[in-house]
Image (spheres, grey):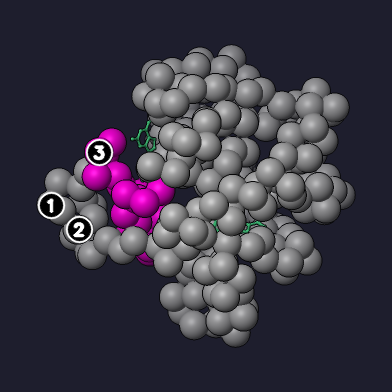
Amino acid sequence: MGPPGSGKGTVSARITKSFGLKHLSSGDILRANINAKTELGLLMKSCIDQGQLVPDDVMSRLILSDLRAIGQSSWLLDGFPRTVSQAEALDDAYSVDTVINLNVPFQTIKQRLTSRWTHLPSGRVYNIDFNPPKVPGFDDVTGEPLVQRDDDTPETVTRRLKAYETQTEPVLEYYRSKGVLVTFSGTETNKIWPHVETFLHSKLPYVNQNVA
Ligand SMILES: Nc1nc2c(ncn2[C@@H]2O[C@H](COP(=O)(O)OP(=O)(O)O)[C@@H](O)[C@H]2O)c(=O)[nH]1
Ligand SMILES: Nc1ncnc2c1ncn2[C@@H]1O[C@H](COP(=O)(O)OP(=O)(O)O)[C@@H](O)[C@H]1O
């Protein structure tokens, strides 16, 4: 959990590298649909570009079907659930062990998102100031071009933050009341990450860990 630009994708990549969890990003799944011009992708694009959440039933169906496909492996969800209705749909099918919440001030976020560059096929993210690609404009791993997301304009970011406040913040309370929410606050991912890593080492000793 965390507002747009709080570092969910960045921290998820580190978790995936350090722990043997499968990573599912709702935003990456939607963008893959848009890129492949699927019917669903075309329908959802205007919603996303306007900074609105896509309908709960569409999102829950997409994620739950991908989770079924993963089978027995442990997983990490990034960007889902974003509404209480999505959290309930997830609860109906699975029990969530832990919810990591990245609490980053909105002012910090606004600066980050307008300088975010994304490799769409993998979901890898870069930032001009924070983690620039080795070659400007190109992905480090594949050498393919990076793009700026259509919804990372200042106006749309403001709308996404509003949607976060009204629709997603109640999910934090939902998980807090279940006793599974752990919040990490700060303005820099490199300072937040060691705390997340230590927490996960204590929480997931049974998961295959690639890094000692
Ligand atoms: N300046 C700065 N940028 C960061 C930091 N952490 C992440 N970013 C960048 O901020 C943008 C948003 O991060 P991302 O992980 O995509 O956030 P998400 O929207 O929550 O998934 C990306 O361009 C990241 O590279 C940080 O500590 N400082
Ligand atoms: N769980 C979700 N429910 C509804 N819409 C979603 C969800 N996840 C992603 N989206 C849509 O995709 C957009 C981008 O999401 P994401 O890639 O997670 O970006 P960020 O975390 O930077 O906002 C959201 O603004 C929203 O329109």
Three-letter code for the amino acid on which mark 3 is drawn: Asp
Cβ(mark 3) to ligand 1 < 8 Å?
yes
- Where 122 falls versus 183 (above or below)? below
Residue found 73% across the figure and 66% down from its top: 55
Q: Tag on residue 138?
A: 2
Q: Residue at x 19, y 58 (%)?
A: 137
Q: CA distance from mark 1 to mark 3?
A: 14 Å
Q: Quadrant of the C terminus?
A: top left
Residue drawn at the location 20% of the way across and 58% of the way down:
138
Residue 129 is labelled as: 3
Label whose residue precedes the other's in the sequence (3 or 2):
3
Frontmost of labels 1 and 3 is 3
Give the structural element (helix, strand or loop) at label 3.
Answer: loop
Quadrant of the image containing the N terminus: top right
Residue placed under numbered mark 1 in the picture: 135
Q: Is residue 135 above or below residue 147?
A: above
Looking at this rendering, what residue extends furthest in the left direction? 135
Q: What amino acid is at disc 1? A: Val
Q: Position of residue 113 (x, y in %)?
A: 40, 48
Residue 20 at least partly seen:
no
Q: Secondary structure at mark 1?
A: loop
Q: Per the image, is 120 magenta? A: yes
Lateral position of residue 83 relative to residue 162, left or right: right
**Residue 76 spot, x, y in % from top left:** 59, 41
For the record, the magenta segment spans: 113-131
